[in-house]
Image (cartoon, rainbow, N blue to C red):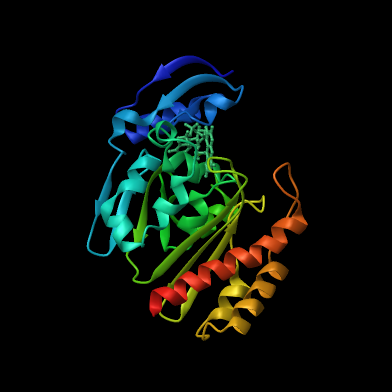
């Protein structure tokens, strides 16, 4: 069970940051979904609800999305669904139920860099930048690889409106379980992006697979070969949900499904 000594609603980002960094045991509260599962003793909970960070703004070249935007907000946004052919809807729809989706936030998910995350795998095949209050703008890929330089707060993200095809594939014991493995793919012109998550390590771009696929015609042979490149370059592990051998075998299957969806989309 978590305990919270004081609850604080800052009116500015600076006040939130100051309070967060005042003591080691102070913590930002997003939706509170994941924090509640733990047993942290929090000094001051810094709740970002009053900072107007729950928004999705569609601009000419990008979507700007506040850190307190919920998974439900992402999943149901018409502009995002149209532009990214339901990528986020697919990645979010099987996560527990609607109550949880109405609560959990994108800022917390990004900052925490959870290995099991479905959302982060999907986001990684788009061109996304993360705005950290102190650290400034950083690419999502770099943030997932290295984390923040110092304690920080995710304020918003910006997703470029690139034209293309997007697919999300996952493998679960049953809907609403955590993913055993997940994969997202995007294709913009001849250029592919492939991300694999829940390996069980955090989502990572499969750069050799992406280079192999560049400009290739999607024949059966090329799809098979891409699967081999993918399973060679990525690190898989074992946990309670699946063994590394199983994950390795399934990585190929998820990639082929995503590529097949892509080739149907082009026909
Ligand atoms: C029961 C349950 C099942 C889940 N199943 C899945 C699943 O199947 N797939 C999946 O992808 N995800 C799953 N999730 C995770 C969920 O999608 C969120 O990623 C997670 O709950 C974090 O969001 P939150 O808003 O609840 O964070 P919180 O619990 O509020 O915070 C989590 C951490 O992030 C920090 N934090 C919060 N906001 C910020 C911010 N703006 N900047 C910096 N730090 C911040 C907090 O201090 C804390 O350390 C599940 C969560 C729960 C509770």
Q: Name the residue nearer the viewer: 189 or 173.
A: 173
Look at the picture and state if 205 lies above or below 136: below
Q: Position of residue 191 (x, y in %)?
A: 47, 78
Q: Does residue 200 appear to the left or right of 5 in the view shown?
A: right
Could you say which is closer to the camera, residue 194 or residue 264? 264
Q: How many marks?
A: 0
The C terminus appears in which quarter of the rendering? bottom left
Q: Is residue 241 left or right of residue 8?
A: right
Of the pair 209 and 91, the residue shown nearer to us: 91
For the point 41% across and 53% down, the residue is 88
Is 180 situated above or below 163?
above
Residue furthest out toward the top: 5
Which residue occupies 35% across, 47% down? Answer: 74
Left or right: 242 as drawn, with respect to 96: right
Q: Position of residue 157 (x, y in %)?
A: 38, 51
Q: In the image, residue 81 lies at what x, y percent?
A: 32, 56
Q: 33 left or right of 267?
A: right
Q: Quadrant of residue 150?
A: top right
Task: Estimate the x, y position of residue 134 in percent, counting from the top left.
Answer: 43, 44
Residue at the far left: name it.
60
Q: Is 187 above or below relative to 70?
A: below
Residue 218 visible in the picture: yes
| Quadrant the N terminus occupies | top right
Mark yes or no: residue 130 visible.
no
């Amino acid at each position: 069970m978590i305990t919270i000594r004081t609850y604080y609603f800052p009116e500015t980002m600076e006040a939130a940051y100051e309070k967060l960094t005042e003591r080691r045991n102070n913590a930002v509260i997003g939706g509170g979904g994941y924090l509640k599962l733990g047993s942290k003793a929090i000094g001051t909970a810094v709740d970002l609800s009053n900072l107007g960070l729950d928004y999705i703004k569609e601009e000419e070249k990008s979507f700007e999305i506040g850190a307190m935007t919920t998974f439900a907000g992402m999943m149901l946004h018409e502009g995002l669904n149209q532009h990214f052919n339901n990528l986020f809807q697919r990645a979010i729809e099987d996560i527990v139920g609607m109550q949880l989706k109405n609560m959990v936030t994108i800022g917390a998910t990004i900052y925490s860099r959870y290995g099991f995350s479905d959302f982060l795998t999907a986001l990684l095949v788009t061109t996304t930048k993360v705005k950290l209050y102190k650290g400034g703008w950083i690419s999502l890929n770099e943030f997932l690889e290295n984390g923040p330089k110092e304690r920080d707060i995710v304020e918003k993200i910006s997703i470029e409106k690139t034209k293309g095809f997007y697919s999300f594939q996952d493998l679960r014991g049953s809907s609403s379980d955590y993913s055993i493995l997940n994969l997202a793919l995007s294709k913009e012109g001849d250029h592919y992006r492939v991300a694999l998550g829940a390996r069980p390590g955090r989502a990572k771009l499969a750069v050799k697979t992406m280079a192999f696929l560049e400009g290739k015609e999607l024949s059966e042979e090329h799809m098979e070969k891409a699967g081999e490149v993918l399973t060679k370059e990525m690190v898989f592990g074992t946990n309670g949900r699946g063994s590394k051998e199983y994950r390795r075998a399934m990585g190929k299957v998820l990639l082929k499904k995503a590529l097949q969806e892509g080739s149907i989309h082009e026909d």
